[in-house]
Structures are given as C-alpha cells and as structure tokens.
Image: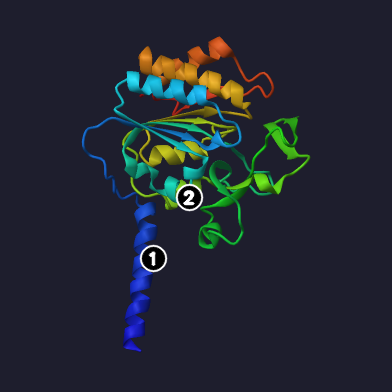
Amino acid sequence: MLLVGIIAISVIVGTFFLYASGKLGMNFSTYDDGVLRAAIIDQLHDDIPNADFIDNATGYLKTAGYQVVDVYTTKDITLDFYKNLPTKGYKFIVIRSHSGIAPGTDQKIDNSLSIFTGEKYDEKRYTFEQIMGWAQKSRAFTDEFEAKVEKTQGGTQMKLVNSDESKTYFSIGSKFINDHMVGKFPGSTIIIGGCNTLENPSLADSLVKRGASSIIGWNKLVEAGHNDRVVLQVLKSMLVDKENGKEAVKLAMRLFGADPQYSAELGYYPQDSAKA
C-alpha cells in the first residue's frame, strides 16, 4: 500500500510540474550559443504549396544574417512541435497557416482565435489536451468547399455551407500558449500569415506574454495568394531594407492594399511597440 501511495504521489507531482512548466513559463531553451536562428512554419504546404514564398523568405532571412533557417512543413507541425517552439531559440518566426476565429457558439473569451497544426483531427487523440482546452477541432476553408461570408456590425462572420471532415485539424489558441507551451520566446518577431490572427488581441497578447516582442497578422479572412505577396513584402522591408516592423506593415498595405475578396488588412501588435 505504501509503494502504491508513493507512486501515486510521484505521478501527481510529475503532472503538476509538467503543467507548471508551461503555466509559469520556465525557460528551457537549448539554444544559447549566439547563433541567429529563424523558422518558417508552412502548415499550408500540403493544401496550398508555394515554393517561391519559401525560397524568397529563406533568402531574405539569410541576407539579414540568420545563420540557421529551419523550414517546417505540414507533417512536422504537431501539438508537441508548438508546445516546444519557444525553446528553439528562434528570433524570427514566419507562420504560413490555416487559422481563424471560432463560431460564436463555440467561442471562449481567451481561446477564440486559433492556429492550425498539421495533424488531422481525431476525437480519440489528445483527449487530456482537449479536456483542458489546449487543443481543439478546427476546419479549414479551401476551394474544395465554400464558406459564406456575411457582413455584420462586428466585422465578418463565416458560415460553413459545405463541410469536408477530412479538412478538420487540431488547432491551438491562447489557452495552449498560456498554460501548455514550454519556455519563453527570446524576444521573437512572429509573423502569422493566416486568417483573423489579429481580429482580437487574445492570441497575440498570449504570444507576447510568452516572450515574443511583436506579432504581425491579419484582422479578417485573407486569401492565401494575397497573404503570400504581402508577407514577402514585409519580410523584404524588415530584413533587407532594415525598416522596423510597424513601418514595413504600413508600406506593404500601401503597395498591395487590403485583401480584394475579404478586405483583410495586415496589422501589428502591440501598437505601442516598433521593435523588430
């Protein structure tokens, strides 16, 4: 009986430590060697590939002095990948991904915005993470089925017309970042090329509290081609022309304008910072 009790206590303490390591933001970074590191996270690689985007983004990062530029594609982007991302030492992160805002009936105040992983949804997987609200089911909107967009007083609301369960993925939001991620970002600039990522500040605020210096993202739905053109311009301005992030966003908007289909505009968070 004593042995069973000791084992049970050990499991409880171990579980608490794992939870606290995310909640308290303990820094377990394994990269402290002064090497400039960047990451390109291309969750769209399987659905909407764009090799030119990856090549150009990689070139801009290397021109700016990043010695390591790691490229991750759909198959690499798991819950564990995002959980440990802050520990990788990336100072610049470019995310090209499905993302979005939960329907009104599913919204939680701190978890309404989400970034997709590359893992297809399966209700039998990640049961604990789903119970805790760290992982959720999200559906991608692609040309294979239609999303009806309606104008509302609060902005745009998307209603699914035709659904395809094969396009449902695990996604992560603020609760995952706040409570389950490990470590701290090293003052990273993070560009999130996906729908709605700055529709409200919850996701960006959680990333900043997790150590990021600034977040760049879209305030509404955005078409992938428009996203790629605008983000590449921002990267060129920041990494080659040495503009700060806020000015790079303004210039890209002047050159390319809002998304022609959904009127999305690129934004910068926090507004009172111009760090890049």
User: Is 267 or 52 nearer to us in this picture?
Assistant: 52
In terms of depth relative to the viewer, which is nearer, 258 or 92? 92
Name which residue type carries label 1.
Answer: Thr
Q: Which disc is residue 26 wearing?
A: none
Amino acid type indicated by mark 2: Leu
C-alpha distance separating marks 2 and 1? 18 Å
Q: Secondary structure at mark 1?
A: helix
Displayed quadrant of residue 35: top left
Quarter of the image where the C terminus is located? top left
Residue 60 in view, yes or no: yes
Q: How is the image coloured?
A: rainbow
Circle on res. 15: 1
**Foreground tag (2 vs 1):** 2
The number of callouts visible is 2
Name the one closer to the observer, 113 or 64. Answer: 64
Residue receiving disc 2: 79
Q: Is residue 134 left or right of residue 153?
A: left
At x 55% / y 62%, what residue is drawn?
127
Rendered location of residue 206, percent (x, y): 45, 41
Q: Position of residue 159 (x, y in %)?
A: 74, 39
Left or right, 8 with respect to 131, comes to left
Label 2 residue SS: helix
Q: Is residue 183 left or right of residue 73?
A: left
